[in-house]
Amino acid sequence: MPTVLVTGGGRGIGLEFVRQYAAAGWNVVATVRSAGDGDALRAFGDVRVEILDMRDFEALESFGERLRGEPLDLLIANAGITSPGEMRTAEEANRFLEVLAVNSVAPTVLASVVASNVNAARGKMIAITSQMGSIADNGSGGWLAYRASKAALNAAWKTLAVDMAREPISIAMLHPGWVKTDMGGGGAPLAPAESVTAMRRVIDGLGPGDKGLFLNHRGETLPW
């Protein structure tokens, strides 16, 4: 039975990934920030819930140690937070750093510490990014820290893909679309189930030669 690790598995897109992979018979490891965040996962049966605060880099390192020797067929680095739209105060600047830590640094640290697990399974590493991280596509501005954090995530994972060019794994960054979640808001056109179903098709189609791709949920290439 294949194994998937989903970060931010307690809500939104992460929760839907957990639901769908559990229903498909996968072994699912889901990380949540606190014990209460894992309550919704109990409905999906035998899901392994791990407490992991993505702002705690030492915890990320030790989490990799806990998984040592366990083959990992799929990593979905999904956990993320929103951000201030402006950068005028010290408080907003500190929030910017937190957004970078959670959205950019943590997924990259995690990918690095579980790379051997993914290699053992000849698996796949997926970062849930955003089209808002595209510099070429930024014609509307706003969401300064969030955009910057996703651009940094894309750059970091592209570098991981180059560094792991000879490894038998797939690496891609996926934009889920505008999804009805706490982050996306009620006016978003996509339900989580629709977005995740589409992304799973894209993930299934990735092969070992697919590294450093920036795609939307339909599998279309996005501009950097």
Image: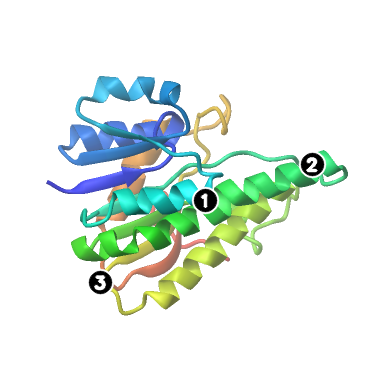
Q: Are marks 2 and 3 in contact (CB under 8 Å)?
A: no
| Picture coordinates of residue 202, whole percent (x, y) | 32, 54
Which residue corresponds to mark 2? Answer: 92
Residue farthest to the left, as pictured: 1
* Crowding at mark 1 (Cα within 10 Å: few <14, some 14-19, many 20+): some
Q: Earlier in the sequence, mark 2 or mark 3?
A: 2
* Crowding at mark 2 (Cα within 10 Å: few <14, some 14-19, many 20+): some
Which residue corresponds to mark 1? Answer: 57
Q: Are marks 1 and 3 in contact (CB under 8 Å)?
A: no
Distance from label 1 to label 2 (Cα)? Answer: 22 Å
**Relative to 204, 137 lies left or right:** right
- Residue at (50, 35) in percent of width and height: 179
Closer to us: mark 1 or mark 3?
1
Which residue corresponds to mark 3? Answer: 168
Closer to us: mark 1 or mark 2?
1
Distance from label 1 to label 3 (Cα)? Answer: 27 Å
For residue 120, above or below residue 14 = below
Q: Earlier in the sequence, mark 1 or mark 3?
A: 1
**Relative to 213, 19 lies left or right:** left
